[in-house]
Amino acid sequence: MQISIRKKVAMTLGAYILVASVLWLLIFLNSLTLNEKLRIIEKKEDLLNTILEARRYEKNFFLTFNNAHLGEAVSFISMAEGKLQDIITHHARYAATPDLERSLAHLKDYGVSMGMLASSQSKAPAPNAGPAPRQEAIRALGREITEEIETMVQNERQQINRLIRDARFYHFAALGGILILSILVFVFFLVNVNRPLKALERAIRHIAAGHYANIPAIPAGQEFESLVNSLNHMINRLNRRNQELIQARKMASLGTLTSGVAHELNNPLNNISTSVQIVLEELEDDDIDFKRELLQAAEKEVVRARDIVRALLEFSRQSPFSIKPVAVKSLVSDTLKLIKGELPSNVTVDVKIENDIQAALDFRRMQQVLLNMMLNGIQAMDQGGTLTISAFDLDDHTFCIEVSDTGCGIPDENLNKIFDPFFSTKEGRRKSENGMLPYDGILEPQGTGLGLAICHGIVQEHGGKIIVRSKVGEGTTFTIRLPIGRTHDH
C-alpha cells in the first residue's frame, strides 16, 4: 500500500516535532531543577552561616561565661530553625538530603539544650558553664548539626554540578538529534520527492523530444503514481494521434502521387490492351511464337502494374512501429517507384548506395520520410537538376542517409523553422527573376507545413535526427543520422 507524500511529510514533521519537544522538555526540566537547586543551596549556605554564628557565640560563652554570648547563640539557633523549616516547607522536593526532618529535630535539640543552659544561668549566683558533661553534650550536638548542614551544602553542590553536566549533555544531544533528524528529512525528501521529480523531468524531456514511451511506475507515493498514470494516459493518446497523423499524411502523399501513378498504370494497361488485341486479330494465324511473345509481353506489363499497386498498398498500410534489418537500396528503389510519375524529364536521379548495405529501421515509416524529402527536392528543382540519394557510415555508431537536390535552396532565416509544425511559405509564393521558386522544404501543395514535422518525428522515433544544409541558389541536403551502424550481407 502506497502512502501519500502528504502523509509521509506529515509523519516526518510529526516525528521531528515530537523529538524536538522531548528534547526541549528535558532541557526545560533540567533548567527548572537547576534553578531550584541554586535557590536551595543559597538558603542552605545561609542556614550554615547562621549555625556557624550560633556555634561561634557558643564557644565564646564557654570561654568567657558571658550570658550575652549565650543569648546570641540561642537567637541564632532559633533563626536557623526557621530557615530549615522554610527549606522543608518550600524545597523539600528538590533537596539533595531527604531526611531534613531529622536535621530539624537535632537543631531543635541543640536549641533546647542552649535554652536550658540560658535558663540555668539566669538562676545561678555566678556565671558558669555548668557540669563538664553538659558542655561536652552541647558541643557534640553543635558539631553534629554543623556537619549535617555542611554535608547538605556539599550534596547540593554536587547535584548542581551534575545538573550542569546533564544540561551540557542535553544541549549536545539536542543539537545531535536535530542534526540527525535534519539529515533524515533531507534524505526523505531526496528519495521521495526530489528523485521522483527528476525522473518525471527526464520523462517529460523525452516526451518533448518526441519519444512517446510510457513512464515506468515511480513507487514514491499516491501523488506521483497518479501523476505518472495521467502522463502515461496522455502519452498513449499522443501516440494514437501521432499514428493517425502519420496515416493521414500518407493518404495526403498518395493524393499528391495520384496523377503520376495513374500515368504509370496507364502505360502497362495500354501495352496489355494492344497485345491482347493483336492476339485476338491473329487468333487463327499459325505463328505460335509471335503469339507467345505478345502474351509474355502482356504478362510482364501485368507484373509491372501489380508491383506499382503493391507498392502503393504497402505504403498506405497502417502498421505498428517495428525496427527490422532493411536493405537500404531496396528501400530507396521502392520509394522511387512511387514517385516515378512525378519525376520531370529535366530531373535526373543519382543513387549512390551499395547493394549489400543494410540498416535496422521501420521500412514504411522511413519510406515516408524519403518520399517527403524526394518530392520536396523535385519541387525545388523546377528548372531541372539532380536528385542524389546516398547512404554511408558517419562513424562506428552512426549511419547516414542523405537526400540532396540542386534546387533553389532554403533561406537562412527559415532553416531553423522548417521542422516546426504548420510552418510554411508556400501560400502566395511567386517566381523570382530567374524563374526559380523559393523552396521552404514543405511537401504539401496547400502549404500546411506538416511534411517535414512528421519526418522529424519519425526519425526521432528511430532515435536519430535530421540535419539540413542549404544555400540559396545551389541546393539543399537532408542528412538522416541513425544511431545504428550498417551491416553487410554475407
Image (tube, rainbow, N blue to C red):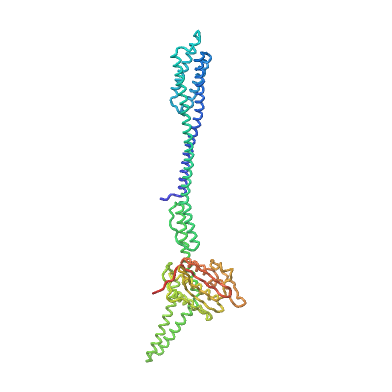
Q: Which quadrant of the structure image shows residue 213?
A: bottom left
Residue 288: percent from left, percent from top: 37, 90
The residue that appears at 46% across and 31% down in the rendered structure is 159
The relative height of residue 87 versus residue 425 in the rendered view (above or below) is above
Residue 337: percent from left, percent from top: 46, 77
Q: Classify the position of the C terminus by image quarter.
A: bottom left
The residue that appears at 46% across and 65% down in the rendered structure is 463
Q: How many marks?
A: 0
Q: Foreground: 395 or 431? A: 395
Q: Which quadrant of the structure image shows residue 311?
A: bottom left
Q: Foreground: 319 or 75? A: 75
The relative height of residue 284 versus residue 214 in the rendered view (above or below) is below
Residue 317: percent from left, percent from top: 44, 71
Q: Foreground: 28 or 11? A: 28
Q: Foreground: 314 or 51? A: 51
Tell which residue pokes out farthest to the right in this image. Answer: 433
Tell which residue pokes out farthest to the bottom in this image. Answer: 286
Asked whether the viewer can see residue 128, the reply is yes
Tell which residue pokes out farthest to the front in this image. Answer: 63
The relative height of residue 205 versus residue 42 in the rendered view (above or below) is below
Asked whether the viewer can see residue 250, the reply is no
Residue 11: percent from left, percent from top: 45, 45
